Image (cartoon, grey):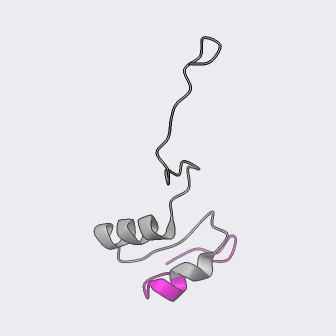
Amino acid sequence: EEGGKIKPKFSEGFHASGHASKKDLRWAIETVDPDTIIPVHTDNPEWFRENFENAVLLKNGQRYP
């Protein structure tokens, strides 16, 4: 507690950016097993294409059939 406020203590290695790690993304995709993966809001859409054969990369405004 500091100045009347409680400060959380995190274990070493704890990551809380709000973004999933590649390991966690892979786990989620393999668990859900979707027919198609369309990555959005990512800095690295190619990672999906390189790691999942059912990944489809769309250009801005492009529709998926």
Of 38 and 27, the residue lying toward us: 27
Of 27 and 45, the residue lying toward us: 27
Q: Quadrant of residue 46?
A: bottom right
Residue 17 showing in the rendered view: yes
The stretch drawn in magenta includes residue 34? no
Q: Is residue 21 above or below residue 58?
A: above
In the displayed structure, does residue 29 sit left or right of residue 19?
A: left
Q: Position of residue 29 (x, y in %)?
A: 38, 70
Residue at x-position 31% and y-position 67%: 32
Q: Is residue 53 above or below residue 11?
A: below
Q: Position of residue 61 (x, y in %)?
A: 68, 70
Magenta span: predominant SS is: loop
Q: Which residues are magenta?
A: 49-65
Q: Position of residue 49 (x, y in %)?
A: 53, 85
Residue at x-position 53% and y-position 52%: 15
Residue 56 showing in the rendered view: no
The stretch drawn in magenta includes residue 61? yes
Callout count: 0
Of 63 and 49, the residue lying toward us: 49
Of 60 and 54, the residue lying toward us: 54
Residue at x-position 60% and y-position 11%: 4
Q: Is residue 45 above or below residue 51?
A: above
Q: Position of residue 38 (x, y in %)?
A: 51, 73
